[in-house]
Amino acid sequence: MAVVRRPRPPSPLAHAADLHVHTTHSDGACTPGDVVRSAVSVGLGAVAITDHDTLSAIAVARPEAIRVGVELIAGIELTAEREGKEIHLLGHFVRDDDPDLLAVTADLRVRRALRIEAMAERLTSLGLQIDLAVIRRTYTRATIGRKHLADWLVLTRQVANHRDAFARYLGDDGPGQVPKPRVAWRDAIDLIRNAGGVAGLAHPPFNLRQCTLVEFSEAGLGAIEVAGPGVDRKCGQRWRGWADELGLAPIAGTDFHAPDRPGRWVGAVVTTEADLDKLRQKRSLPQ
């Protein structure tokens, strides 16, 4: 008697997307291909690679995304500044060959390289041993940042762990910290929009005011993260309400960096099909 095999039910995530994922091309631990395969393994329909201040992972990931049949959304997370404070702006559906965006990110990488050299000098003056040549050879694709310096300090047993590295040396007020180069927030929104993308506010601060979001919206912001690691549920609900009022797309993602962070695996936090459609519609607006 023949065995009748029932078709496997479709994944509940088949039309959902993780819209905030990092790779080894910035400060993530997984390659672009690894990220794409992880998205497929959990049944996601789409995944956005949003590395910090670089688009280089998109071209690397695209052939694998085509091979395994998942939508790859070209993205970026730009380091921006507003009123002297650092903010992060996501760009989704950008053209990864846009000359203006590539020029700005290339300049940011040069300035970040100078920043790391200054941080290495500060750490050396504190009695630590830093070998930038080895660090750069270890992370050949990455834009070297604090995370990589912390990796080095842990590897060479100069600190107990990453938390210790940031608490003692690399935190925002630490003796080894040098501020990151940033783009003016209005310029960052314009860059994303002119590259065909939708600009979104990443991990908003818990004390975000509606009038501030209105200002962002009037400058061309098209989306806001309403769910993700560390996002308080009440804040997320409030931001979603504001998004509805302002016509912004409510988006979500894991801010994935490494597979050893509980609750932050690829696909652990997703943007629903309905909200992804809203984001797509924002893309169709005149740029």
Image (cartoon, rainbow, N blue to C red):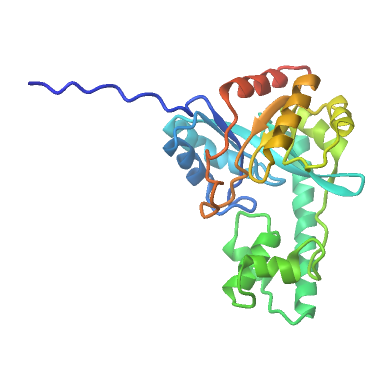
Q: Is residue 270 above or below residue 164?
A: above
The residue shown at (64%, 78%) is 158
Quarter holding residue 121: bottom right
Q: Is residue 59 above or below residue 159?
A: above
The residue shown at (76%, 37%) is 101
Does residue 287 appear anywhere in the picture? Answer: no
Camera-side residue: 145 or 64?
A: 145
Quarter holding residue 20: top right
Does residue 47 appear anywhere in the picture? Answer: yes
Left of 21 or right of it: where is 130? right
Extreme-right residue of the structure: 83
Camera-side residue: 140 or 78?
A: 78
Extreme-bottom residue of the structure: 127
x and y percent of residue 198 in the render? 73, 28
Extreme-left residue of the structure: 1
x and y percent of residue 214 in the render? 87, 27
The residue shown at (71%, 79%) is 128
